[in-house]
Amino acid sequence: DIQMTQSPSTLSASVGDRVTITCRASQNIHSWLAWYQQKPGKAPKVLIYKASNLKTGVTSRFSGSGSGTEFTLTISSLQPDDFATYYCQQYNSYPYIFGQGTRLEIK
Amino acid sequence: QVRLVESGGGVVQPGGSLRLSCAASGFTFSSHGMHWVRQAPGKGLEWVAFIRYDGSAKYYADSVQGRFTISRDNSKSSLSLQMNSLRTEDTALYYCTKAETVVSHDWGQGVLVTVSS
């Protein structure tokens, strides 16, 4: 199975900061990676698919990049609504493993 | 708009069985693959199973292989997850999701399964 490792596990940042979350795959997954945002008590929402494609309706503050085994999610200027937990998921091959999550908290 | 409503959760003893359902509306159900994803209390997301739009292929996480069965009824726009030989580690909120090229673009609100004696 492909393993997905996110870093950091927790990130403290301030409104207006630019932040980056990294996701590494244990083997080549090409660009078959999605990013999700989850707020407490709510279902996750997809932000990015195929590594860099922004889901329609998602703010352009979010961007994704990478291919192969290393990927990043960048939030260009943090807003209060962005404080949440973020997950990556590979969909190159089954099982479709999620990363362990990155909790983004207010500094 | 897309609506996914899970049901069938509850408390069950270890070794027991439970069947989850997901009622779909707002889209052409028979054209989309569907996933089950779960989340243990206070933990991260775990992909559980996927079924193709026509039911022709099914895939499972190693942790549930041989115990869980995903199925669908396109005539009723319904997705199911039959869970047998349940373990305490299966305790989680179970989400059904609608796939767009296998990515979970739409999620239900989740249904809680608690495995406890």
Image (tube, coloured by chain):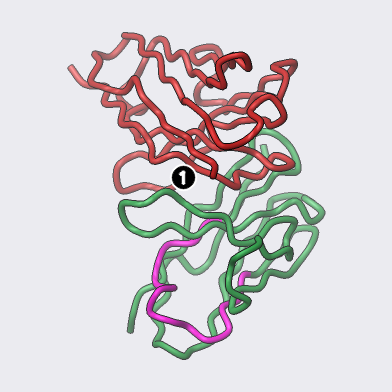
Chain colours: A green, B red
Which quarter of the figure is the N terminus of chain A placed in? top right
Residue B48 location (% of width, % of height): 53, 30
Of all residues, the one furthest to the bottom in this rendering is A16
Say whether residue A33 is left or right of residue A98.
Answer: right
**Residue depicted at 23% across the width and 20% down the height:** B11
- Residue in the image at 60% along x and 58% along y: A35
SS assignment at label 1: strand
Percent x, y of residue B117: 17, 16
Q: Residue at x 53, y 81 (%)?
A: A19
Return the residue at label 1.
Answer: B45
Q: Is residue A5 left or right of residue B109?
A: right
What amino acid type should be assigned to the residue bearing mark 1?
Leu
For this rendering, which residue is in front, B26 or B53? B26
Q: Residue at x 35, y 39 (%)?
A: B40
Q: Quadrant of residue B2?
A: top right
**Picture coordinates of residue A104, whole percent (x, y):** 41, 71
Mark 1 surroundings within 10 Å by alpha-carbon count, few (fewer than 14), some (14 through 19), many (20 or more) = many
Q: Magenta stretch: give its range.
A: A73-87
Residue A49 in the figure: left or right of residue A37: right
Badge 1: chain ID: B
